[in-house]
Amino acid sequence: MNFGDKEFNDLLKTTDANFNWGVSSSALQTEGSYNSEGKGLSIWDVFSKQKKKINNGHHPYVATDFYNNYKTDIDLIAELKIPNFRTSISWPRIFPAGNGKINQEGVDFYNRMFDYCLAKNITPWITLYHWDLPYKLEQNGGWKNREIVNHFIDYVAMCADLFGDRIKNWMVLNEPIVFTGAGYFLGVHAPGKKGLKNFLPALHHAAICQAQGIRVLKSQLKNSNVGTTFSFSHIESYSQKEKDIKAALKADALVNKLFIEPLLGQGYPFKEIPFLQSIENYMIAGDEKLLHEVPDFVGVQNYTKEVVKHSFFTPYLNAKIIPATKRKVPTTTMQWEIFPESIYRILKKVADYKLVKSIVVTENGASFADEIVNGKINDHQRIHFLKNYLSMCLKAKSEGVPLDGYFVWSATDNFEWAEGYYPKFGLIHVDFETQKRIIKESGFWYKNLITQSAKNKHEIL
Ligand code: IFM
């Protein structure tokens, strides 16, 4: 479905004084300075050194050099009148070994950066874990080792102490199904571990940490707004055959329920995913309770939908994804299907959970091959994408979904994990040779939209 200007403008009127417009980013994908000023190595710094792990042998050691360029980028975000900026704290920059001694130079960087945001009237929204685990902890089993829970609690408590006077909006984990699934089951993300024996303990410890993290922040910071984020995709069955429908239900539970349901007190979705039952080998008495904590908001991250078919040969799940390229549907350069309705369906489903009080779309965006013509980037495909996805979000909001914000992924082009630098998601283009920035047309489009929304707000008041 494509939305016309009138429809879009009408939907935009559903945004009010409290709606949070923003852009998202993360430490590892932008900061660079991977081993300077006392920072410890992260699992991604080490993974990137291994052969054939990252497309084209790329690495995040310099990235967008946000560590040194943060003022430039925050100035550009301010120029675009974007009031909220989501990024993450690099755990190994604060605790080079993951625990123990603090690295004051790392703390100073975040103090400088947060203060600069606030001076520019930009509210920082901070994720505590966006995949860059301290390598020292990985050497001790990483997410597989239950000791991580205590290290994580100490790290969260320290961040609350250090930055809680200025940071109100927190997200505990970024997309736990992705960092446990890709990093500890498929082995395609850091730390490159495979199989159920790695995945299940990693999953369980991450699920405990997401609840514990919320508890720690809420108890230390009384006026905070604490959430955690999930990667959700709308799942469709390839056909109406019973076995495909069953496969799609399993995939849906794995992608869309595995982390949110225990957090909301519903436990793991054992019924839909029987092989998950072995997670009980890693559970101890009292864990069910430990997994449950109600966040102030749920961070929804959506890009696409998946079509799923029964597969005899796929171990455990007996389900496989039919790639968008095979189905000959429109895609982004990541070969993800462009399907705006996905975000609408997801928002409706998340809003159906009784304990969900507020939802923020903490990521939505698209990678396209941008072209510089006469110093400008007219990324009309990205504008079209954002407009249609955002319309779907606002449609859900107009139907009662408690949607309180929308963040575009991403502020600038950056390091896209195992894909390296070829996917461009930014509203701001980065030349990785010169570190020169150019605001894309989509950036100006977003600025206009935010300005228009502020006027609506004025009319409503
Ligand atoms: O770049 C990532 C981000 O780190 C997590 N969510 C999806 C984005 C695009 O792949």
Image: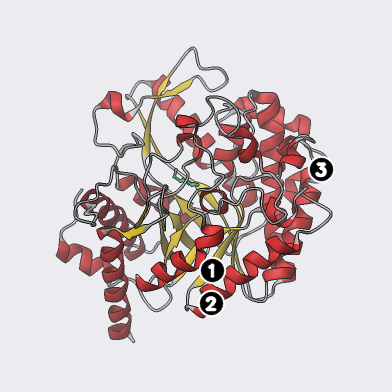
Spatial CA distance of label 2 from label 3 is 36 Å
Residue at figure coordinates x 22%, y 69% from the top left: 10
Q: Quadrant of the C terminus?
A: bottom left
Q: Is residue 107 above or below residue 204?
A: below
Q: Position of residue 247 (x, y in %)?
A: 45, 25
Left or right, 95 with respect to 228, comes to: right
Q: Earlier in the sequence, mark 1 or mark 3?
A: 1
Task: Specify whether tag 2 is near ligand 1 (CB below 8 Å).
Answer: no
Which numbered dot is residue 147? Answer: 3
Which residue is rendered at x = 35% and y = 51% of the image?
A: 344
Q: Is residue 205 above or below residue 362?
A: above
Task: Name the residue that disc number 2 marks.
Answer: 118
Q: Determine the residue located farthest toward the front in the rendered image.
A: 434
How many residues crowd around disc 3 within 10 Å: few (fewer than 14), some, or many (20 or more)? some
Cα distance between the residues tagged 2 and 1: 8 Å
x, y percentage for residue 236? 36, 33
